[in-house]
């Protein structure tokens, strides 16, 4: 009996945990009235919203967030664009959430993004590309911690979870 319980629960302790991603609906998404449609797409997909708020970004925070771009010629323009109005930040969770969300978002330049993706459906620009999404599981955690305090993130299991994942996918 004990051995059977250990075998049955093996997957629970050794399967991959859910990933999380930081999403920013950028000023280009906010000003164009796309907050609702973008949040709706993630909910329809089955991603769990663990945190959500509106905030004004500032240069200090953006220098950390876009540290890989500080030497690019477009960096000053990017800061101006990202601080033009409040943004929506979200923490989304799900199995393989990083890859799933990046495929829903599409590539950086909206003109190269396929129809059906957020950037493909809503944008025409590289800079004004509607949305940010974390690019790795590690960055998903780092970026979420940069934009949210611990009490703003909620660890709950949605009531419809058994219709989103099978039991073995969920653990
Ligand atoms: P990503 O948002 O698709 O992950 P990154 O290379 O991380 O793309 O760049 C961060 C942001 O910097 C982009 O989303 C975009 O707003 C801006 N950006 C990147 N490359 C360019 C460019 O060539 N021209 C103008 N803005 C750019
Ligand atoms: Mg990026």
Image (tube, grey):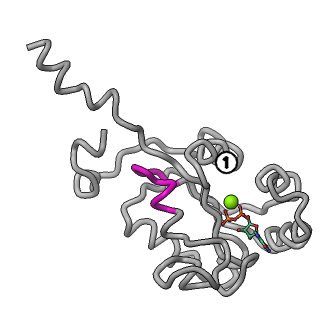
Residue 3: percent from the left, percent from the top? 14, 14
Q: Is 127 displayed left or right of 162 in the figure?
A: right
The residue sitting at 41% across, 38% down in the picture is 17
Quadrant (top left/top right/bottom left/bottom right) for the N terminus: top left
The residue sitting at 65% across, 75% down in the picture is 130
The residue sitting at 46% across, 51% down in the picture is 93
The residue sitting at 45% across, 72% down in the picture is 41
Q: Is 77 displayed left or right of 128 in the figure?
A: right
| Number of numbered labels in the structure image | 1
Q: Inspect the magenta stretch and tell me whether residue 97 lies in it.
A: yes
SS at badge 1: helix
Quadrant (top left/top right/bottom left/bottom right) for the C terminus: top left
Provide the residue span drawn in magenta. 92-101
Q: Which residue is mark 1?
A: 143
Q: Inspect the magenta stretch and tell me whether residue 77 lies in it.
A: no
Up/down of 41 relative to 169, above or below: below
For ligand 2, give the image quadrant. bottom right
Q: Nearer the viewer, residue 151 or 32?
A: 32
Residue 63: percent from the left, percent from the top? 85, 53
Residue 104: percent from the left, percent from the top? 49, 69
Residue 164: percent from the left, percent from the top? 28, 57
Within 10 Å of disc 1 (Cα), the crowding (few <14, some 14-19, many 20+) is many
């Amino acid at each position: 009996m004990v051995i059977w319980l250990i075998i049955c629960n093996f997957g629970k302790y050794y399967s991959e945990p859910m990933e999380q991603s930081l999403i920013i609906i950028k000023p280009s998404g906010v000003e164009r009235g796309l907050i609702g449609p973008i949040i709706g797409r993630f909910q329809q997909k089955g991603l769990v919203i663990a945190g959500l708020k509106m905030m004004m970004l500032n240069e200090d925070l953006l220098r950390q967030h876009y540290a890989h771009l500080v030497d690019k010629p477009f960096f000053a323009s990017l800061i101006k664009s990202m601080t033009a109005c409040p943004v929506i930040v979200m923490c989304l969770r799900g199995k393989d959430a990083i890859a799933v969300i990046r495929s829903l978002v599409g590539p950086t330049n909206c003109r190269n993004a396929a129809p059906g993706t957020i950037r493909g459906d809503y944008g025409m620009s590289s800079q004004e590309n509607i949305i940010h999404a974390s690019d790795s599981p590690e960055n998903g955690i780092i970026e979420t911690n940069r934009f949210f305090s611990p009490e703003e993130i909620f660890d709950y299991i949605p009531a419809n979870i058994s219709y989103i994942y099978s039991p073995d996918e969920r653990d």
